[in-house]
Amino acid sequence: MLGQQWRRIVIKVGSALIAPENKGCSTRYLLAIARFISECRQRGIEVILVSSGSVAAGRSAIAFSHQPVPVHIKQAMASVGQYQMMQRWQSLLDCHCGQLLLTHDDFHNRRRYLNIENTLRTLLSHQVLPIINENDSVATAELKLGDNDNLAALVATAVDANVLIICSDIDGLFSANPRSNPAARFIAEVDCISPEIFAMAGGSHHSVGTGGMVTKLQAAQKASQQGIDTLIVNGQKPAVFEALLQGKAAGTLFHRQQERISAKKHWLLHSLKAQGTLRLDAGAVTALQHQGASLLAKGITAVQGQFEKGDAVLLCDQHGQPVAKGTSQFHASELHQIKGLHSQQITAQLGYCGREEVVHRDDLVLLSASEAAAQSAG
Ligand code: GLU
């Protein structure tokens, strides 16, 4: 898959490469990455860059020494750092760069999602390099995508890329955390992102960026389900980029799956964040999994979280294991009142006539074991 077959690639660069050691924006690792981007473009490959690091790059400009750093201070840091980071990329690249700052809402709302697609396609058709980050200065915690690994996968899907390259400060996926376990084995290729693969990632987190290996696996899963090959590479090593340009292997390659899942299922699974959880009885789980049924209030035993009508919720079995995800037709407070009731009793309980299904079959996706693991980790 390397080199020759690349048509459109999304490259995600992590904060640890943009602002190593939190001392503002640095060219240390970006030079080799910029050279790689230029070379790809020279060869006619379209490139979209997802660049983290606004908060890390702006950290030195805003004096604040206490931990944890509150949200409004991070937002101020991001405002300074985003600008510096864009300047840095522009100074390293000969082409025009265009900035897109996105929030979770932009992916949640179908119309805005289509706008993202259109803007990116237009930029690419004019040979502009789109540089994307989350809009960290305005996104509040509940509206955040949270990490740019997942953002990059959503972008790769939106622009129909065929390769996603996640540049990190680690060589790729290991069987355990190599920083704490010397016996950790490097994994060069992954065909299927199983729960065992997620287990390898453990809770590895980085001190500079937001994501860890878990968010990279979530991104690889999202992308590979859309027919996109995903690479996790060490962006600190220029040799990695030279190897890729020569069509040689580097990092961990997650092979694309042959079958693409439907756009709606993908949107439900990956663009919508679950705002709550519904615990179901065994009968409801069987009906969902084996009878193609919708979820009725009768099968709900517990309701967790604050969610509105239309928000996504995870549907879990008696043991708390997620089995499906879908959009609720009721507000959380309504579900507290009607859980366990037969459909005929709902109107009497609420005082008005609601929908019969709590989650309609058309607005629901069943989760495989690995998708359930990704949703729980998220
Ligand atoms: N959007 C954040 C930033 O630019 C980083 C998120 C991440 O590290 O994945 O600072």
Image (spheres, helix red, strand yellow):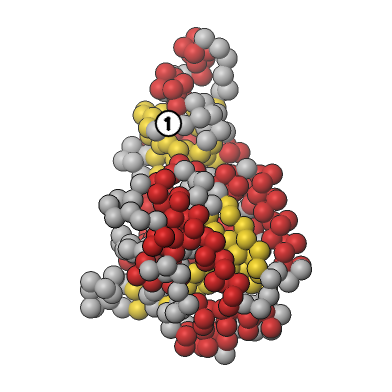
Q: Which quarter of the picture shows residue 204?
A: bottom left
Is 374 left or right of 9, judged from the image as shown?
left
Coordinates of residue 277 in the picture (x, y in percent):
41, 36
Q: Is residue 361 above or below residue 133?
A: above
Coordinates of residue 217 in the picture (x, y in percent):
43, 63
Q: Does residue 371 appear in this view?
A: no
Q: Does residue 135 appear in this view?
A: yes
Looking at the rendered structure, the kind of residue marked 1 is: Gln
Is 272 left or right of 197, judged from the image as shown?
right
- The structure residue drawn at horizontal position 57% and vertical position 83%, both measured from the top left corner, is 35
Q: Is residue 109 above or below residue 371?
A: above
User: Which quadrant is home to the N terminus?
Assistant: bottom right
- The structure residue drawn at horizontal position 53% and vertical position 12%, both measured from the top left corner, is 347
Instruction: Find numbered disc 1 in the image and state the secondary structure of the residue it sits on.
Output: loop
- Front in this rendered view, residue 16 or 240: 16
Label 1 Cα neighbours within 10 Å, binned few <14 / some 14-19 / many ≥20:
few
Q: Which residue bears the numbered disc 1? A: 306
- The structure residue drawn at horizontal position 47% and vertical position 88%, both measured from the top left corner, is 239
Coordinates of residue 363 in the picture (x, y in percent):
58, 39
- Front in this rendered view, residue 350 or 96: 96
- The structure residue drawn at horizontal position 67% and vertical position 54%, both measured from the top left corner, is 116
Q: Which quarter of the picture shows residue 321?
A: top left
Q: Is residue 42 above or below residue 255?
A: below
